[in-house]
Image (cartoon, rainbow, N blue to C red):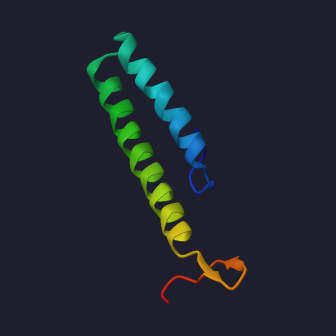
Amino acid sequence: MATEGEERSVEQDLEDLQKIVAQLEEDKLGLAESIVLFEQGVALSAAAKKKIEEAETKVELLTRRGSKVEPEPFGR
């Protein structure tokens, strides 16, 4: 997993989330460890969701101007 402040991609978040799910499914962890992993998974899921929503917003802001497709800045 990335260190604090490091920019992560959606793919990295999802890969780490899959690893956490696999660990939790093994059922070899204690309750405290499982809770910590679950919290990390929730945070990764939220981060990935936010990045996906930001990407969707950027795509929605693309507008056709003549024969060119150009990004439109947020807030227009």
Q: Could you tell whether 2 is left or right of 21 in the image?
A: right
Q: What is the x, y in percent for residue 67? A: 73, 80
Residue shown at 59%/42% (left/top)?
Answer: 11
Q: Could you tell whether 22 is left or right of 34 in the image?
A: right
Q: Residue furthest bottom?
A: 76
Quarter of the image for residue 36 reads top left
Quarter of the image for residue 41 reads top left
Residue shown at 40%/39% (left/top)?
Answer: 40
Q: Could you tell whether 4 is left or right of 68 in the image?
A: left
Q: What is the x, y in percent for residue 51? A: 50, 57
Total tally of numbered discs in the picture: 0
Q: Is residue 23 above or below residue 61?
A: above
Q: Is residue 63 above or below residue 40?
A: below
Residue shown at 41%/25% (left/top)?
Answer: 21
Q: What is the x, y in percent for residue 38? A: 34, 33
Q: Residue furthest left?
A: 31
Q: Residue furthest right?
A: 67
Q: Is residue 66 above or below residue 2?
A: below
For the residue pair 2 and 47, the one nearer the viewer reads as 47
Quadrant the N terminus occupies: top right
For the residue pair 11 and 4, the one nearer the viewer reads as 11
Q: What is the x, y in percent for residue 46? A: 39, 50
